[in-house]
Image (spheres, rainbow, N blue to C red):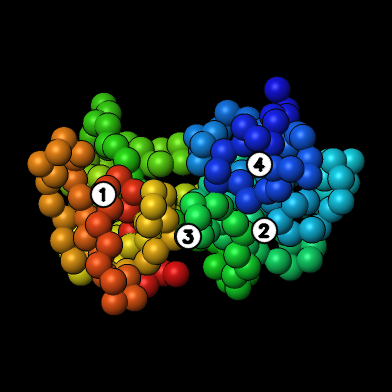
Amino acid sequence: MTHLKTIAAPRTMKISRRETKFILSPIAGPHAKAACVPLGVVLRDYLGLVENRKEIKYMLNNKEVLVDGRRVRDENRPMGLFDILSIPEIEKTYIIMVNHRGELLPQEIDKKHADYNLCKITGKTALRGGKIQLNCYDGKNILVDAKDGKKYTIGGTLVLKLPELKITDFMPLEKGKTAIVAKGRHAGKKGKILDISKSDLNLGSLTTLECDGEKVLTNTDYIFMIGDKL
């Protein structure tokens, strides 16, 4: 199904739920349906680069539209947090960010940053041949040597060179580092990590951040390390 009712659209989409009945539906892909926005919605409703679906399809079929350094032609392709959208013809580059309402929105950035992507590690898998597979939140899988695998810890953020996905830097999840809250009641807040602790309420790990002089407590799973990159 390429459409869904606007009333059923995930809250990550900043759309009017009264003006239109249907909206493009994200296909299965690198981001969960509840944590993404279809590419066509970004191009039409957010950036205003096209006015209708016909123009969306024409643009994707006839012009270069890159997501994380790779050309995309599917209007339903899901766009998630920190995806990089580049449109070379108009020399524009955007990064998908989250606001205080948990909505995902494109934010224009300098095109010199178009070749880099922040990617959170959510798991690690040992493979034959002395390799470790780093499993990322957006479906990317990065292979590294087992001897290097130990330094890439779960919860940390890789800085990847696009489109070859070469690791250029790594930001571990630890106190004193800068992070953003990706979802939940404190979505969009950025600050320095003060503490990471276990919860007594079976909620897993909790993280305390200092955001603009305010202490914020949130689930560690909601944390995305950004260092001084953003």
Q: Mark 2 or mark 3, which is nearer the start of the sequence? A: 2
**SS for tag 4?**
strand
**SS for tag 1?**
helix
Mark 2 highlights which residue? 86
Marks 3 and 4: which is nearer the front? 3
The quadrant holding residue 187 is: bottom left
Q: Mark 4 or mark 2, which is nearer the start of the sequence? A: 4
**SS for tag 2?**
strand
Name the kind of residue labelled 4 in the image: Pro
Q: CA distance from mark 2 to mark 1?
A: 31 Å
Residue at 64% over, 55% down: 85
Residue at 25% over, 67% down: 215
Q: Mark 1 or mark 2, which is nearer the start of the sequence? A: 2
Q: Mark 4 or mark 3, which is nearer the start of the sequence? A: 4
Q: CA distance from mark 3 to mark 1?
A: 17 Å
Rendered location of residue 28, percent (x, y): 58, 28
Mark 1 highlights which residue? 220
Name the kind of residue labelled 1 in the image: Thr
Marks 2 and 1: which is nearer the front? 1
Residue at 26% over, 26% down: 128
Q: CA distance from mark 2 to mark 4?
A: 15 Å
User: As rendered, which of 62 and 205 lies closer to the eye?
Assistant: 205
* Numbered label attached to residue 100: 3
Residues at marks 3 and 4 touching, judged by CB atoms closer than 8 Å = no
